[in-house]
Every structure is written in structure tokens, then in C-alpha cells.
Image (cartoon, rainbow, N blue to C red):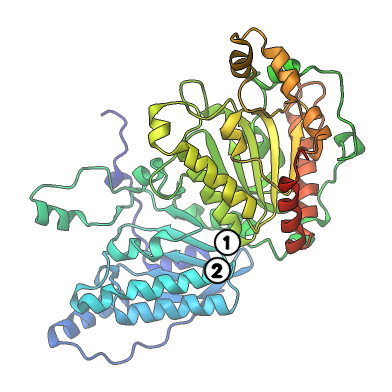
Amino acid sequence: MAGRFDPVSERPARLDARALRDLVLDPGSWRSWDSPVPPRDVTPGYAAELARAAEQSRQDESIITGEGTLCGRRVAVVAGEFGFLAGSIGVAAAERLTAAVERATDEGLPLLAAPVSGGTRMQEGTVAFLQMIGITAAIARHKEAGLPYLVYLRHPTFGGVLASWGSLGHVTIAEPGASIGFLGPRVFEALYGEPFPADVQTAENLAEHGMIDAVVPHEEIAEVADRALRVLSARQTWHQDVRDAERPTPDDGTDADDPEDGRSAWDVVTASRRADRPGVRRLLRTAATDVVGLSGTGAGEKDPGLLLALARFGGAPCVVLGQDRRGQSMTAPLGPAALREARRGMHLAEQLRLPLVTLIDTPGAALSREAEEGGLAGEIARCLHDLVVLKAPTLAVLLGQGTGGGALALVPADRVLAAANGWLGPLPPEGASAIVHRTVDRADEMAADQGVRATDLWRAGIVDRVVPERPDAADEPAEFCLRLGRVLGEELAGLLGRDDTERYRTRLHRYRNLGR
């Protein structure tokens, strides 16, 4: 097909581990952690292969490890070397890799991994295959310590390497045109007598299907990794980061300000549906810094109705889950995959102890056979469960429409904000009117009776703070986004400064006693 991406012709020249390391890290900052490989008791044939591999690659194994600085920040690095027996992992390589991960954990360092491998080393059999368990355990301990793990998949990455340390990143990006998959195409053809389908095992296809976050050329790795780490590593430094941030003005509103301005509930609903109303993308472009977009569930699903990102507001770090008005419509509403993607963001916030910001802006979740068979109700329930018990700070924002279960799934939070024309209801007012009055013509009455406006929600104790619109965010998109950004920065700093146990107990008490 004309214009189709050709991964082979577009693939950049392969960089060995040393060249990639020197491209990404600050000049002169590298310090190797590698110890000499001990003598191996192997067959003469395998010994000869190892000797040739060492001579050709100028490496003693398929893994290099060490530390350096990235834009001045100390980081640990583990990288594969394809020139040494196709980057395959045997016992010695696994020991080097595992020891480096453990050292990074002990020293509290972010870990950058750059796998490239045909898989585990066939010459060492099952014992090499099972090394993936120990490597995975070491990475699990690293992540349990709240330390970032970033992965850059290179061409090619296959087999047990992809099925272990290659697929566990908090953020996972890949080399353009890289071949990435579980079963190598040569093995597939030998086993099944036909070639593997073209263009499946490519970085671009994996990104399109939500398996990885992005495809990034070599020269941009350092900048992307630095932006990600400015958020992922900011839990300990946020005090300094927010010190010089722009603070809210008196006109930005506080939680003590009565938000009543005379607009009816139907006025609010109508305003929230304007096509030119700013959404999550405009907010991030205008008011956030260090934005790193993530993509999909990491398990083969991606829904355009949800945007997942790392970002900072007013210097305060957070994971952002935003319902993207641009990616939703009556024909393509929010589906269960979007909520599974949201749960990925919740788990990321939990692991890295970062605040979670949910931005609610949806006309409602999907009503379809596919949504039912895809487990929509169960995903709403699991989102509610995960949010209510999440140990990380949580902040929800009613940015626009807040319809039904799609909105409910992202509402529970330590603090709940609303734009002045944001609202929350169990159904669109037209749907509620159809149930109660057997007609949609009394939707305006139902909106008023159900108390869906931000003003009503504030008075009911559901919303803590209403951010003004003057008079409508669609008429002042940049000013509104900057206003909301200032408020988000202040709210996040307040949440980060609270005792975790007290904050968690307060959240549970809030929803236990709501409406009583």
C-alpha cells in the first residue's frame, strides 16, 4: 500500500551497547559495575563460540552494567550487546544483570534498561531459561522500593528477554523499526512451515496496539528519559520543585468560596457539551510541564477515550488519567479498555508513590454488546476498588461532562474539584427524564432535580472546590487552563504534604458518610 511504513528500510543503524550508552549519558560520567566473568566449565565447541563472540564484540558477555549521569541525575544502566551471541542470556549474563538491578535498588537509583536479544542462550539449556525468574524477582524488588524502571527495546528483542525484564518498565519505548516479539519468526517458520505474518512484530505495531508507550529514535532517548524521571523521581524532591511555582490568585477560587453564579443546571450541561470546550490535551499543553504520554494497557489494548500521562503542575509530580473528549463520541464511547488503561495508571501511581489526577470528561461509557462482553461493569467496579484503597494521593477533577459509570469509575479521591461548568450525574439528563417522565423533553428539570451542577455538588460535600469559568472555559481556553493548572499545583502540594495514613483514613470516612 502506498506510504506504508517499511520497518526494515526505516530502521536506524544498530548501535552497540557502548555507543548507545555514550549517546544517552552525560559525557565522561560512565562507571562500569562489571566484574570479570569467572571461568566456565563448558564444552569445547561452546568455549570456541564464546571466544569468537568476545573477539568480535570486544565484550566478555552479552550484558554491560554500570552507572552514569543523565542530565546531571545519577542513574543505573543495564544494556544488551547483540554482537555477543545475539545478545542471548546465559547464567553469567543473568548474574551480572541481576547483581546490577540489586545494586541499583540498594543505592536508590532509577534503572534504565536497553534490552536487545534473541532470547535465552540455547547452549546453556533450561538453566539459562530459568534465569529469567531471578531477573524478574530483582526488578520486582526494585519497583517495590518505589524506584523508576525505564525500558528501551532495541532491534531485535525476542523470547525470554521480552517475556521478563523487557516488559516490566514503568515506561517502555522502542527503537524505530525494531523487531520485537515472543517467538522469533525463524522459529515460527521452522515449526509451522509458513512465514510469520508481516508487520506484526514491529515497534510501530506494538505502539499502535498499546503494548509499548512510544517509538523513539536514538537521539531523543535522553530527552524522553529525563522528562520521565523528572516526574517519576520527584516524590523526594517536590518541596524544592514547587517552591518557585506560580500560586493561585484570589480570583482562582478556594474551597471556601460559594460557587453560585446563577447558571441553571441545564445551562451547565449545555456549556459542558460545547465542541470547542478545552479538554485534557489543551490543559496539559497549556498548564503542565515535563509531560510524557503513555499509551495503552501494556497488554494489547488502547482506547482513544482515555489519555494516560506523566506530568507536573506547579512543580508537583503526578500521573494523569484524563478522559479525552476528542477521542469519544456517541459512535465511539468510552469502553472497558479505557478503564483497564486507567487501572495501569493507578498501579503506576501506587508503585512510585506519586499523586494520581483523574480528569473526568465523558458523555458516558459504551452501551453495546462489545462493552458487555468486554466486562465494562467489572472494570468500573475494579476502578472504584483500586481508587478507594490506593495508597497514593488522589485528586479528581470534573472537567466537563460527568455521565454515568464512566465518570463514576474515576471520581473517588482525597480531593474533588470541578470546573464551574462541570457536572456529575447517573445518566445524561435526557436519559433520566426518559426513565422518570417517559420523555426526554424534561431533561432540564431532571438536571435541576438531581443536583448535578458543580455548585450543587459543592453544597452536598461531593466537590471540595470549584474553579471559576469567566463565563465559559470555551470562551477563555488558555486563561481557564492556566487557572486550573495553578489550582492543581496547589492541591497536589497540599496532598503531598499530608500524612499518608491520615489522608487514607479521611478518604474512607468521606465515602462512608457521604449523603448522611
Horizontal and vertical percent position of residue 361: 63, 31
Residue 21 vertical position relative to residue 488 in the rendered view, above or below: below
Q: Residue at x 44, y 40 (%)?
A: 302
Q: Residue at x 85, y 46 (%)?
A: 247
Q: Residue at x 37, y 62 (%)?
A: 15
Within 10 Å of the Cα at label 2, are there few (<14), some (14-19), or many (20+) other Cα atoms? some
Evaluate whether residue 28 shows in this view.
Answer: no
Dots 1, 2 in contact, CB < 8 A: yes
> Toward which corner of the image does residue 501 lie, by quadrant?
bottom right
Q: Which mark is residue 144?
A: 2
Judging from the image, what secondary structure is the residue with disc 1 in? helix
Evaluate whether residue 87 shows in this view.
Answer: yes
Label 1 is placed on what type of residue?
Answer: Gln
Quarter occupied by the C terminus: top right
Horizontal and vertical percent position of residue 73: 63, 67
The CA distance from mark 1 to mark 2 is: 6 Å
Q: Is residue 16 left or right of residue 49?
A: right
Residue for badge 1:
351
Quarter occupied by the N terminus: top left
Horizontal and vertical percent position of residue 205: 34, 43
Judging from the image, what secondary structure is the residue with disc 2 in? helix
Q: Earlier in the sequence, mark 1 or mark 2?
A: 2
Q: Which mark is residue 73?
A: none
Q: Is residue 88 left or right of residue 507?
A: left
